[in-house]
Amino acid sequence: MDKIVSILARANSAIAVVAGLLLLTAVAATLLDVILRAFGTSLGGTDELSGYAMAISTAWGVAFALTERAHVRIDILRNKTVAPIRALFDAVALLALVGVSIMIAWRGWGVLSKTISNNARSNTALETPLWIPQTLWWSGWTWFAISATIMALAVLVSLVSRRYEQVDEIAGFEGEA
């Protein structure tokens, strides 16, 4: 399981770089658009495209935050307990995140499915076929659900094997206890 979690972390790091580049591209396009407006012209659509970039990079970025143990948690009780209880708290927290991520991916599919069936387009000058950004957005949430599930399985295997340090390495609190 260690190898799988390690591969997952490396994949999410690479995905985070791509998501960051997407955001940087959106910033550069917006900056260029603002500069061009001073000369009486515009790229047009940068507000719409940067919104898509933000949604897509966020959806894909949450899996990176997960593998980096950067999600916000309230750990006041966890940090005052012994290793087996801390590991149990970590497992419960991760299982809750799995449930939420699966729900988001499942409900996101409903949004994407309706968009595809209605051939929906944005109500802007670009008339973007919405299935394009929504597919990328939904794929990110689906990847998050997959990542969270893999990590939860690794935590549960470690918990059952009483390898509490390994649970902490996978899903524990990153910082001072």
Image (tube, rainbow, N blue to C red):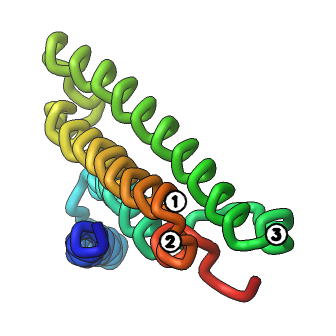
Residue 150 placement (x, y as % from top left): 32, 53
Decide which of 71, 153 is in the foreground and name it.
153
Q: Quadrant of residue 4?
A: bottom left
Nearer to us of marks 2 and 3 is: 2
**Cα separation between marks 1 and 2:** 6 Å
Residue where numbered disc 2 is placed: 163
Give the class, few, some or many, for how many residues have Cα within 10 Å of label 1's Cα (few <14, many ≥20). Answer: many
Q: Which residue is drawn at 26% across and 51% down?
A: 45
Number of marks in the rendered image? 3
Q: Is residue 79 left or right of residue 108?
A: right
Q: Do the residues labelled 1 and 2 touch (CB within 8 Å)?
A: yes
71 up-or-down from 110: above or below: below
Residue 96 placement (x, y as % from top left): 57, 42
Decide which of 7, 157 is in the foreground and name it.
157
Q: In this view, does 54 lie to the left or right of 46?
A: right
Q: In this view, does 114 lie to the left or right of 58?
A: left
Residue where numbered disc 3 is placed: 81
Residue where numbered disc 1 is placed: 159
Q: Residue at x 24, y 77 (%)?
A: 10
Decide which of 5, 83 is in the foreground and name it.
83
Q: Which amino acid does label 2 sit on?
A: Arg
Residue most toward the front? 161
Q: Earlier in the sequence, mark 2 or mark 3?
A: 3
Q: Which residue is drawn at 70% across and 66% down?
A: 86
Q: What residue type is labelled 3?
A: Thr
Residue 76 placement (x, y as % from top left): 85, 67
Q: In which quarter of the image is residue 16?
A: bottom left
In the rendered structure, find residue 50 and report the number of the disc placed on it: none
Residue most toward the bottom? 176
**Residue 33 in view (yes/no):** no
Q: What residue type is labelled 1?
A: Leu
